[in-house]
Image (spheres, rainbow, N blue to C red):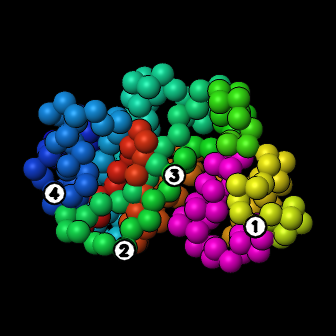
Amino acid sequence: MKNKRVYSFADGDGHDKKLLGGKGANLCEMTQIGINVPPGFVITTEACLDYLKENKLPEGLMEAVREEISQLEATTGKSFGKGDDPLLVSVRSGSAMSMPGMMDTILNLGLNDDTLAGVIQQTGDERFAYDAYRRFIQLFGKVALGIGDEHFDEYFEEVKQRAGVKADVGLDAGHLKEISEKFLSVVRRESGSDFPQDVMMQLQLAGVRLTIGANFISRPTWRTARP
């Protein structure tokens, strides 16, 4: 389809690495031959080129992304940004050519204050949930917002020292909750804005950053291909 910018793994041409990037094309091919791949979708290299040319997202791109997210919700039975069983995605870019060492991944995108409660209820493990949240805040802050790790690490080490532990595993749920709250304050201080609680805004910011050098993968997967 002309000007189509988003392809589900079930629909994308697994041989068209120029359009879908190597990893995106491979995921499409694996899906279509029956390998157990989490559902997801690919944003094309053409969308990336359009963004770089116009310095804005192509018209209709986010609407197409929302449609694919709705399909992921229907397929998985999970809800993106709400509910007791939240849909969390990872986002990573791909390229027609291998680019070792140049790609980052954002895991657990879709976590916010509301979905965090859903993860706690679903897993019954408060420590696990806050550990995932603090990791997501730092990774999103670094990759999508350009905040250096050192701004987060100083607070992390401070809490570890106060708790009298050397390894991360020595921290309990209360410590990790405190760290998450401190990390949110780092984002506010360093970016001038609150950490985005709107999960579609998280997705958009991740995608924009990806087109200028960062990378993301979803689980279910939203994969963006770079030229």
Are the two marked residues, 4 and 1, in contact with CB atoms closer than 8 angstroms?
A: no
Task: Residue 17: give its label.
Answer: 4
Q: Secondary structure at mark 1?
A: loop
Give the mark nearer the N terminus: 1 vs 3.
3
Q: Residues within 10 Å of mark 1 (few under 14, many from 20)?
A: few
Q: Residues within 10 Å of mark 4 (few under 14, many from 20)?
A: many
Task: Residue 135: give its label.
Answer: none
The residue at 28%/72% (across/down) is 99
The residue at 71%/63% (across/down) is 167
- Determine the image quadrant of residue 81: top right
Distance in Å between CA atoms under marks 4 and 1: 45 Å
Question: Where is mark 1, residue-wise?
Answer: 166
Question: Where is mark 3, residue-wise?
Answer: 107
Are the two marked residues, 2 and 4, in contact with CB atoms closer than 8 angstroms?
A: no
Pinpoint residue 6: horizontal percent, then vertical percent.
29, 45
Distance in Å between CA atoms under marks 4 and 3: 24 Å
Q: Amino acid at mark 1?
A: Lys
Are the two marked residues, 4 and 3, in contact with CB atoms closer than 8 angstroms?
A: no
Q: Amino acid at mark 2?
A: Gly
Magenta residue span: 130-157
Pinpoint residue 98: horizontal percent, then vertical percent.
23, 69
Residue 148 inside the magenta-drawn segment:
yes
Question: Where is mark 2, residue-wise?
Answer: 101
Q: Is residue 220 left or right of residue 99?
A: right
Q: Secondary structure at mark 4?
A: helix
The residue at 31%/51% (across/down) is 43
Give the main secondary structure of the magenta stretch: helix
Give the mark nearer the N terminus: 4 vs 1.
4
Q: Secondary structure at mark 3?
A: strand
Residue 77 inside the magenta-drawn segment:
no
